[in-house]
Image (cartoon, rainbow, N blue to C red):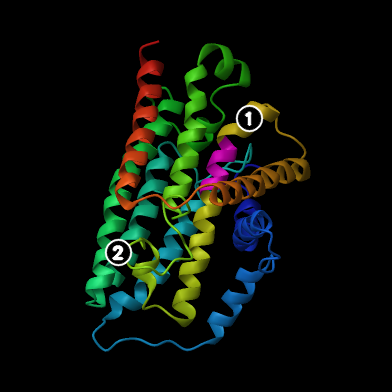
Amino acid sequence: MTGSFLPVLLALVCAPLLSGIINRIKACYAGRQGRPLLQLYFDLFKLLQKGEVISRTTTWIFVAGPSVYLATIICALLVVPFGTVRAPFGFTGDFILMAYLMGFGRFALMLAALDTGSAFEGMGASREAAFSALAEPVIFLCFLALGGGLWPSLYAFCQAASLEIWTFTRPELWLIPLVLFVLLLVENCRLPVDDPNTHLELTMIHEVIILDHSGPNLAFILYASSLKLWLFALLLVNVLAPKIFGHTPLESALELALVLAGIFGTAVLVGVVESCLARLRLLVVPRILGMAGMLAALTLVVTLFR
């Protein structure tokens, strides 16, 4: 199963399910029935059938932003391995391409927000740019620490060391999954960093830059956001799975099931975190990212000078 497209197809089909799992966990914690597990599928189908309201002040940039955002996330998925299954287009240094594809998609959304001429959306674009600028170095530090200062592929990063090496030789690497989980919350605008359900002006980060989108373009943004959540959950599972299940390729169906269980388990963990923690103040978020960056940098320094 080298270079298989099946994991990418699974992501395209199953990614919206993560949102349903998170909402169900939050509903259970609150003692509510909650929305249907497949609610995002219904929302996407309904949005694709609707028309769009586009301001006369906008240009083609506003219309193209959501499509570029979705395309970049799908392209980023093509270089991410799925357990011991190599990515279809993996290569040495592919993590750089993955990071900058996601950055380019975010940049397209920010340009679309600025194209509306709204001061409100300009404020949201400014916040999005500030937090992404803080998160991007942390991503690189994580993978450099995993690779021991080298620049191999994402597959080599995730398969680099066994459970024994992580536990007895390089125990500092256990900080990396923690940092990746923090990045998952930040990059996907989840609580306690951001609330995807809020519409309060003083607390909105990501939601404010998509307020003027509607119809199919809004569907593209919501679908791309679910794929991005899937991508970060997959990265976290890829780092931990070889330490738990070993490096020997399993039967294809069993391996897919185990990695899928890890991705859905990550969604459950996100739901638990969002149920237990309140929204942080906006000024605290850079401190969280700074702390995550310090942990990743500490791991890299210890790895290099051991």
Q: Quadrant of residue 137?
A: top left
Q: Please, what is the three-letter code of the amino acid marked with disc 2?
A: Gly
The vertical placement of 191 against 248, above or below, is below
Q: Main secondary structure of the magenta part?
A: helix
Q: Residue at x 42, y 59 (%)?
A: 72
The vertical placement of 269 against 150, above or below, is below
For the N terminus, the quadrant is top right
Give yes or no for residue 236 being in the magenta stretch.
yes
| Residue 247 visible in the shown view | no
| In front of the other: 263 or 5 | 263
Residue 277 image position (x, y, % from top left): 51, 47
**Could you say whether the residue bearing mark 2 is in a helix, strand or loop?**
helix
Residue 165 image position (x, y, % from top left): 57, 16
**Could you say whether the residue bearing mark 1 is in a helix, strand or loop?**
helix
Q: How many C-alpha atoms fall within 10 Å of the one at disc 2: few (<14), some, or many (≥20)? A: many
Q: Residue at x 63, y 30 (%)?
A: 242
Residue 229 image position (x, y, % from top left): 52, 54
Q: Which residue is mark 1?
A: 242
Q: How many C-alpha atoms fall within 10 Å of the one at disc 1: few (<14), some, or many (≥20)? A: many
Q: Please, what is the three-letter code of the amino acid marked with disc 1?
A: Pro
As measured in the structure, the alpha-carbon distance from the residue carrying label 2 to the one carrying label 1 is 39 Å
Q: Quadrant of residue 241?
A: top right
| In front of the other: 37 or 259 | 37
Q: Which residues are magenta?
A: 232-238
CB within 8 Å, label 2 to label 1: no
The vertical placement of 68 against 179, above or below, is below
Residue 158 image position (x, y, % from top left): 54, 32
Q: Which mark is residue 95?
A: none
Q: Which residue is mark 2?
A: 124
